Amino acid sequence: MDKKLKIRARYLTKEYDMMKNKSDMLKTLLPFGNNDIEKFWALKGVSFDVYEGDSVGIVGLNGGGKSTLLNIVSQIIPPTSGELTVNGTTNIISVGAGLNGKLTGRENIIMKCEMLGMSDDEIQEKMDDIINYSGDQVIGKIDQPVKTYSSGMKSRLGFSVLVHQDPDILIIDEALSVGDAPFFEKGVARMKEFKEQGKTIMFVSHSLSQVKALCDKVIWIDHGRVVMEGDADEVLPQFDEFQRTYNKKTKAERAKITRESGKDFDLEELRQSHPDEPVEYFNRRLYDKPFSWTTRLALFLITMVLCFTVAADLKNLPLRTAVMHPQMVLSLKWLIVIVAVIAVMFIYSNVTRHFKERHVLD
């Protein structure tokens, strides 16, 4: 019998703006600001299929795009382009995900279970099982604030809550890596129970032994691209060999590879390299498109009109009078100051942009 397709990804991409501070975000709205914000492509056209009952491991170097991919599959963040189809409900487990540090462990269990749609009676029925599954350390601090928990305790608590649900697709992002060996074995046993029930599992871990114990298939992602996909016994040895070679490089060499990898990608080139695929796969989402020059100019003009209106109101001038006699609202002195500020910002943005370009070239 053919397995049911649970996850279908086609040419998923994700671009991030590498904004250093809040002022960079403001500059992107201004036509005279420094709009040359550095971009980074975390995913560069990732495609794969996952079927019902599959246990799929996602491996790769730090910064390779593994967590970004899981967050997109979980529909926590949107892709920049591509198509994603998920047939079923997803639960994502990561270290401390969704936990409120000010609440106690017990209160966090109630909060997370309510967010997952459980009734009060269902929560109370499963409360003891969830707490006991989390282990002795969590049991001893279950009524203390979660901010006092270690990373491992947070992971155990979050993992315990979610494995006591009934998800179609379980996504695990390093949640078992911070636990001890007994907890990992308990987690693997529970994952195998899910698998026997026909559940689908996606698992990210830097521990290849954990991936081998839990997963039948593996997707190897490197700097946002799928390098290899197949059976765990085939992919893991090749990734392990690659990882050993990479780790022999100097820190500076590794940093350079990571920095440059986010720039050597163009969405239009991806489209041209797959001419037979639907063009919709390679179109940016509306919410992920950068502001155009006309949009920035319109925002700037709206801001100026708003400031002019507020200034007229502060001077108790009717708007019609203010429009007919703008000098009553904005004196020549203040107009000169505004022009000077805009000129300084424009010059500063160009100087910093040229400095950054020279720094990158160096």
Image (cartoon, helix red, strand yellow):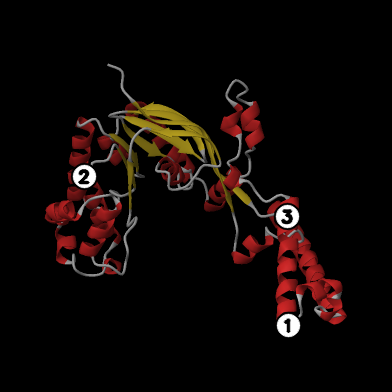
| Residue 15 on image: x %, y % | 57, 45
285 or 79, nearer to the observer: 285
Q: Name the front one of labels 2 and 3.
A: 2
- Give the residue type that dot 2 points to: Gly
Res 168 label: none
* Residue at numbered disc 3: 357
Label 3: state its secondary structure.
helix
Name the residue located 27 percent from the left edge and 59 percent from the top edge.
111
- Where residue 306 sits, quadrant-wise, is bottom right
* Mark 1 in CB contact with mark 3 (< 8 angstroms): no
Front residue of this view, candidates 98 and 354:
98
Q: Is residue 129 visible?
A: no
- Marked residue nearer the N-terminal end (1 or 3): 1
- Residue 337: percent from the left, percent from the top? 81, 77
Q: Pointer 1: what residue? A: 316
What distance separates the C-alpha of mark 2 from that of mark 3?
49 Å
Query: In x, y percent, where is residue 202?
Result: 34, 38
Q: Which residue is mark 2?
A: 187
Name the residue type under label 3: Glu
Disc 1 versus disc 2: nearer the observer: 1
Q: Callout 1, which amino acid?
A: Asn
